[in-house]
């Protein structure tokens, strides 16, 4: 049997929001690599997929440091990428799980940059956190000729302000630790009333804030908190 | 038994890229509403989900006209929304399927605007076409501090050009019938080498073009054709 590597998107959090393909693949793996390291993310990806794993599957947790030291991070990416390639060359069915969608704001992309585009690699896409937030809050992402921007709140403030001015709808990811700053930008753009914030969408701890003007700047937030802005939805109804 | 309405995202095309939740829900429906009307889309959503349907499920195809006459379209949306509400009030388990994700460029949003936010409505998110294209082409959407814009090619040309200038990565949807114009905009922005186009991703007819400069302006394209731009990917490798 030929070795194969599957990058498996787990979706936003609820176990049944994984794809049928990822669920079936998980049942046939020899080895599953589960990333750990982010606050709140340590066991989350693994806990999402655990019910689909076969009895034969060996689990390997790999720790990705949040360090600002890029040499340290690159060494880990090199090591994990090399380990994955080695397992495939030994003929194993190997999985690497990744929260949300594997190709959007995911550590997996750093491994992909090292592994390249071999025939034995399959990437299984998943439901993004913002699609889950739109569904749970019943707020559309975009329609017709509208445009949507997906932005990390770690981006420069001028870029965020520019995007807020230009797009009909916006997804602001990585709000954790930056809420006060983002709230101020939304207020400046007159968009507080078109915004909502959701944390841990589809998980038991799910929380949703609709009136961000009333949310304290110091509001403690879970790590997975995202703001959705849709300028036209309220008026369209 | 209380009636319930499920807006079910089918994902990009392959039947096993639907979520486990949508697959399970499909098996328990009394009635399934399947949209028809777009070129190539008539039976696609239904063909994706057919294997998950229970024997008891009654299928109702509803035709959404592509007409430019908004009164005609609104009349259809009103009728379908009213029919869905009526089924729920009669105690039925009702599904409405929608390609890709229900909340992004989907007819479902026009029904949602009419139905509002009742307790008996659940929206099940899905894999977007662009997540599938990223996975199939092994091209990341965005990472770290990058920003991504999702734009319909029906948008004004100046908006598309502006987005091409500002974002690190872009998804250009609804390319069908507009390829020559979009190719010219990409050329002006010096982005032809960072772009790829994919049609019918994850379906048997999947096609991918990597060198858009070599693709003829008259290239016949399937209805579901999307361009992905990632400015940093080639150089990052």
Image (cartoon, coloured by chain):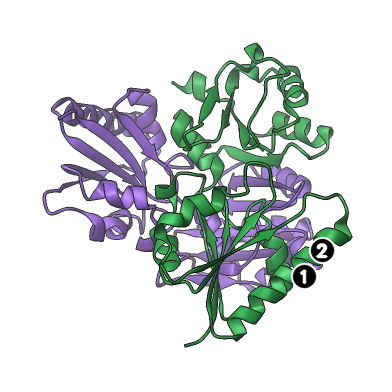
Chain colours: A green, B purple
* Tag 2 residue: A74
Q: Is A229 rendered above or below residue A125?
A: above
Side of A151 where B49 appears, left or right: left
Up/down of B131 relative to B4, above or below? below
Task: Give the side of residue A202 with respect to residue A162, left or right.
Answer: left
Q: Residue at x 37, y 62 (%)?
A: B16
For residue B70, which quarter of the picture?
top left
Where does residue B145 sit, x and y in percent of width and height?
77, 46
**Chain for mark 1?**
A
Residue A177 seen from this side: yes
Residue B142 lies, in percent from the top left, at 69, 53
Q: Is residue A143 visible?
A: no
Image location of residue B113, percent across then percent down: 39, 26
Q: Is residue A182 above or below residue A150?
A: above
Q: Position of residue A196 (x, y in %)?
A: 58, 24
Q: In the image, what residue occupies the spot 43% across and 68% down?
A: A25
The residue located at (52%, 45%) in the rendering is A12
The residue closer to the viewer here, B154 or A138, is: A138
Residue B213: name its quadrant.
bottom right
Instruction: Kindly check if marks 1 and 2 are in contact, taking CB atoms under 8 A apart as contact.
Output: yes
**Subunit bearing disc 2:** A
Residue corresponding to mark 1 = A78
B15 to the left or right of A212: left
Q: Nearer the viewer, residue B203 or B162?
A: B203
Residues indicated by labels 1 and 2 sit on the same polypeptide chain: yes
Q: Mark number for residue A34? A: none
From this view, report whether residue B105 is shown above or below residue B78. Answer: below
**Label 1, label 2: how far apart the Cα atoms are:** 6 Å
């Amino acid at each position: 049997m030929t070795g194969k590597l599957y990058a498996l998107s787990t979706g936003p959090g609820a176990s049944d929001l994984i794809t049928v393909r990822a669920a079936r693949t998980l049942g046939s793996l020899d080895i599953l690599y589960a990333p750990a390291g982010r606050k709140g993310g340590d066991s989350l990806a693994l806990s999402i997929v655990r019910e689909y794993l076969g009895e034969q599957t060996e689990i390997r947790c790999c720790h990705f440091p949040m360090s600002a030291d890029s040499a340290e991070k690159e060494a880990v990416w090199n090591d994990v990428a090399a380990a994955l390639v080695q397992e495939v060359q030994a003929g194993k069915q190997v999985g690497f799980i990744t929260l949300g969608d594997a190709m959007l704001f995911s550590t997996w992309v750093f491994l992909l940059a090292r592994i390249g585009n071999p025939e034995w690699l399959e990437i299984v896409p998943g439901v993004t956190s913002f699609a889950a937030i739109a569904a749970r809050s019943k707020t559309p992402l975009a329609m017709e000729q509208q445009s949507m921007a997906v932005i990390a709140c770690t981006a420069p403030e001028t870029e965020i302000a520019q995007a807020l001015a230009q797009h009909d709808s916006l997804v602001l990811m990585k709000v954790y630790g930056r809420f006060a700053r983002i709230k101020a930008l939304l207020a400046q753009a007159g968009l507080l009333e078109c915004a909502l914030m959701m944390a841990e969408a589809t998980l038991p701890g799910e929380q949703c804030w609709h009136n961000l003007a009333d949310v304290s700047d110091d509001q403690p937030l879970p790590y997975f908190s995202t703001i959705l802005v849709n300028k036209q939805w309220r008026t369209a109804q």
